[in-house]
Image: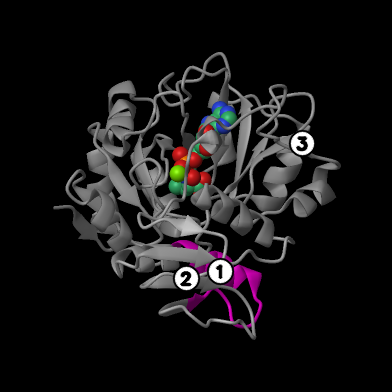
Amino acid sequence: MAIILGPTSDNIKIAAAKIKSGGLVAFATETVYGLGANAYDANAVLNIYKTKERPAFNPLIIHYSNLADIEKDAVINENFIKLFEKFSPGPLSYVLPKSKSSKVCDIATAGLKTVAIRVPKNNVALDLIKECCVPLAAPSANPSGSVSPISAKNVEKMLGDKIEFILDGGECKVGLESTIIDLSGATPAILRQGTITKEQIEKVIGKLNIHDENSDKAPKAPGMSLKHYAPKCGLRLSQQNPIKGEALLCFGKNIDTSGFDIVLNLSETDNLDEAAKNLFKFLHQLDEMNVTRISATLLPETGIGVAINDKLRRGAE
Ligand code: TXA
Ligand code: MG
């Protein structure tokens, strides 16, 4: 069973030693918990794929603590600099061309000519990366296709028998994965919606594309076409004819909850940030409560509501 390490400097050294010797450590970030390995070590990264049962075509986000290190592995550009100054450290990941001298192993980037990079805004994560002296390849610390973990306990439940250490940094402040923007092509495009919205990004670099999964031309985040965010019991977007033991996952005031045995409200005060923070947390809770099914209502399609609805629709597919 995995050991949960509190965020002390001694424990960060223990976690870093594990990673430096080719092992895996799950660690807190501000978005969700990541499953980290040395991004330069192909065997270590291969082990991430095995542990998560992640398909090899789905590349990983590489986590750095500073810009100078990013420039060794990726080719940066003007839009990147503008966005980086505004949003990093923070919940934004950038897809950039991989540099010729990049040491990031090919398995981590699934053989692509691009690399996704991010600087997390969480001291536990940053201290760990610094102590490792290498960037960390880190997907969310869950088995492929299940809900991302937002606490050390969530990780323990899902991967506790497969990894040795979980570096605990408390509950994730954001609770949703980072927004991903592709800056490697002629036109910047959002590949994954998250807390940092299209509008916020457009204010800094101008008009953006949103990747349309049905188009072959647009750039892709390979992981996005998979069935993701699926709670084990099944999720639907209709409130008609609830069955016994069905839970309602709703948002806002004055909700009609009749017919549901369990009701979890993402935010009773219509607060979208609170809803984002609660989404994965509640999905994990409902899985643990063994509900028979989850019925979810969509949120207003504005700001971070767009990203939350995207996850709910994917979960219901
Ligand atoms: O918030 C986050 O981003 C979390 C924390 C741990 O940092 N990480 C995370 O990683 O969500 P993961 O592996 O669950 O999602 C990574 C996504 C996938 O959809 C993958 O396809 C995409 O990033 N991706 C990675 N490298 C890419 C690349 N070179 N081009 C396009 N998409 C890429
Ligand atoms: Mg994931």
Residue 63 showing in the rendered view: no
**Above or below, comparing residue 247 to residue 64 in the picture:** below
Marks 1/3: CA distance? 43 Å
Residue 13 at x, y = what percent? 26, 49
Count of labels shown?
3
Residue at x 43% of width, y 35% of height: 135
Of badges 1 and 3, nearer the viewer stands 1
Callout 3 environment at 10 Å: few (<14), some (14 to 19), or many (20+)?
few
Horizontally, residue 138 falls left or right of residue 302, namely left
Which residue, given by chain and number where applicable, does mark 3 sit on?
79
Q: Classify mark 1: helix, strand or loop.
A: loop
Residue 303 is drawn in which quadrant?
A: bottom right
Q: Between disc 1 and disc 3, whose residue precedes?
A: 3
**Outermost residue, top side:** 100
Q: For residue 239, which numbered disc appears in the image? A: 1
Callout 2 environment at 10 Å: few (<14), some (14 to 19), or many (20+)?
some
Residue 140 at x, y = what percent? 41, 46
